[in-house]
Structure formats: C-alpha cells, structure tokens
Amino acid sequence: MDFIVAKQTAMATCIEHKGIVVSLKSSDYTTSEFKAFKKSILQVLRYCDHVHLVLVESEYRLYMNDAAAVIPTPTDPGPSPNFTGLTELAQIENTKAIFNANKIAYYAQEGVSDAIKNIISTNVPESILSALQDEDHGFANVTALEMMTAIGDVATDNEAFSVADMLQQYRTMPDLEGEESLGNYFHKAEKLAKKLSTETPNPVPNHGALQVDLLAHIKAHGGFKDDVNDWEVKPSANRTWDEFKSFFKESDKKRRLLLKHGVSSQSSPFGANNVTDNDIDVKISTKVAAGLAQITKAVESSLDEALATVPTNTSNRISSSTAAATKRIEELTQEVEKLKKENERSSRSRERQRKMNKQCPHCNRWHPYIAEEKCYGHPNFSGEVPSGWKKADP
C-alpha cells in the first residue's frame, strides 16, 4: 500500500543521512556541544522535510523565517474514507484523494519519527535518556522533541561563571512539576560537583547535605508520600546518596508516567505501584482493539491482493487470509486469558494489601509489609534505629 511505502521511504531517507550526526561521546557535554548535536539532527530532518519534530513552535518559526508558521500535525485519517452523502463520482474521487494524501503524510511522519528517535538514542550516552526509556517499550511512548529537551537540560553552560554561581545552581531545588525529571536533575548535580572540584580548592559539595534538603523538598511536594515513607524506614546503611538517587529517580519516573495518563500517584493508598481492576480492563480492551485492528488490516490486505490477481487465485488468497485471521484470533484469545489471570492474581494481592493496610501506631507511617514489632518505634524493637529517625507526625 502507498502509505506503507511512504513510511518505509521516509525511514530510509533518515537512516541514509545518519552519518552527519555529531555524537555526544561523553555525558559531561557543554551547551555548545549540544547545539552542534541538535544542528546535525536538524540537518538529517531537513532531508526528510520534518524539522518540526524536534522544535517547539517559537523555534520552528525562527527556523522557517515565518512568524505565522504552524507546526504540521498530520493525524491518522482512519481505515477508510467517509463517502457519506456523496453521490457524484468527482466528489468521491476527490475525497478519496484527500484521504490518501493525509494517510501518506501521517505514515511518512511516523517513519521519520521512529528513525530519528533511534538516531538520537544511539548518538548520546545511554544514561542521559534512561529516565525516558520504558523497560518494555523503549522510546515508543515519547517524542523526539521530549528526547532532545531532556538532552538539552543536562548540558552545562560552557561560558565562564563564578564558583558562587555554580554552588547556587548545585543547591537549587528541582521543579518537580516541571519538564525536567529527577534523573536529569541528579545528572546535572553530579556534573556541577565534578566541575566545582576542579575549579576550586574547596572540597567537593557535600551530597549528604543536598540529600537532606532534597528529601525535605520532595516531602513538601506531596506527590511522593508512600515512597518517602518507604525510604525513611530503610536501614541507615542503605540510605546513601547513590541509593537515594536510584530510589527517587525510579519513583519520579513512575509518577510522571501515571500523570501522563491522567492518574495521580496519590489517588490510592497503595501509591504509584498500585494496579486497579480498571487498569487491567483497559489493558484487555487495548489488547483486543489492537488485535482486531491487525486482523482487519490483514484481511483487507489479502482481499486487495486477491482482487488484483486473476479470478482463479482469489479463493486461495481469501482462504489464506481467513486462516491467518483465525490464527490471530486464537492468539488474541490466549493473550486476553493471560491478562484475566493476571487480573485475578492482582485482585488477590490487593485484597491482602487492604487487610494489611493500616497506619502503624508506633511511627504513624504506612508499612504494610513490615510487621509492627519490627517497626523502629515499637517499644520492644531491639535492632539498630537509624540515626535521625523519629516518629512521623500523625
């Protein structure tokens, strides 16, 4: 089909010019190095006529030298044209032509987007984009613009500035409601500390002091309540700076993913890791819809091919299509059954959580998987109480 060819052609064009990209070899790169990287990415996209994929509207207008330029946003027009109410052949043909053009534009952009995201991710250190990368789907759920923004956020100013300015930057708390993830914030803090250690005879900034301030900042935000509670009951030996970064980087990643889908991490007493029955229902519905779409597409494709051949081959091709569709339905049924079983296991787990879910009277915290007698605040607790630990406010 024309739109599939358009997608493949667009991807091939991008890949053909990937050699001009100026890679960021080290995670300690400057603003100037990032600009060179971004310029090379734009050069690749210019060959594909899709520079808007990594530009915000103000940048796009400057790039196009047009104050009224609007970023094109082609959308999938659907599986087939809408001929409702059309009686004239010319109207039908015109509607079909517009539909095909929109379909080709959409799939071409999808092809460029997939290719450029792969090019971006393979030309920067893996750690830079780890906060955006999904364990199962990679970068499928983020845009090329979001990737470039994350890379730009980590770049350090290569112009001369005072030690006082660097210290101020180091001590500035992140905007937890902003675009910058905690993963990127931690990376910048490490880079500033490294730069300060070479620019001044004073000791490297104390990450411990920053950790205390940052934990207070995270607490005040209110969106990490359960994770803060989990962190504070960890043994002191496990509450190092490296552990702190890793723990809250993942916590922030989950929180942002939930917010992206319109779910608050505090909407449930079980926090960001809670999975509801509705979540499973959505997964099942999505899986069924995706499967049916694949079946429909396969059948339509086979029918198109059959109708394009001589009549003697038609029945064979349709039979082949039917067999493929039947096989896909069987696979889809198995996948849905698997999700239902997952839902049953999750329901039993949540029921156990509900029974265990109560505030501990000894510390005023929620720790459903830690027995009361093992709470630091329990009068009979005989283990080591972490330095600085105190009972939470009711």
Image (cartoon, rainbow, N blue to C red):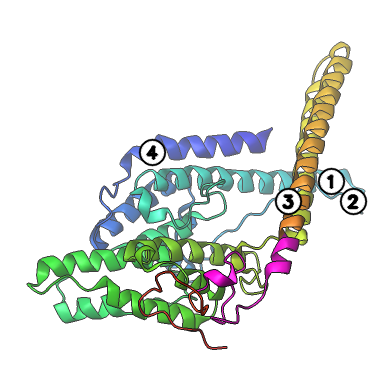
The percent coordinates of residue 36 (x first, y second) are 28, 54
* Residue sitting nearer the eye, 169 or 43: 169
User: Do tag 2 and tag 1 residues touch (Cβ < 8 Å)?
Assistant: yes
Residue type at numbered disc 1: Ile
Mark 1–mark 3 distance (CA, rounded to whole Å): 16 Å
Mark 1–mark 4 distance (CA, rounded to whole Å): 39 Å
Is 92 displayed left or right of 69 in the figure?
right
Tell me if I can see residue 79 in this picture: no
Question: From the viewer's perspective, is residue 375 above or below residue 101?
Answer: below
Is 385 displayed left or right of 366 in the figure?
left
* Residue sitting nearer the eye, 70 or 54: 54
Residue type at numbered disc 3: Pro
The percent coordinates of residue 80 (x first, y second) are 80, 44
Mark carried by residue 17: 4
For marks 3 and 4 on the same chain, the one whose residue lies earlier in the sequence: 4
The answer to which image quadrant residue 299 occupies is top right
Mark 2–mark 1 distance (CA, rounded to whole Å): 6 Å
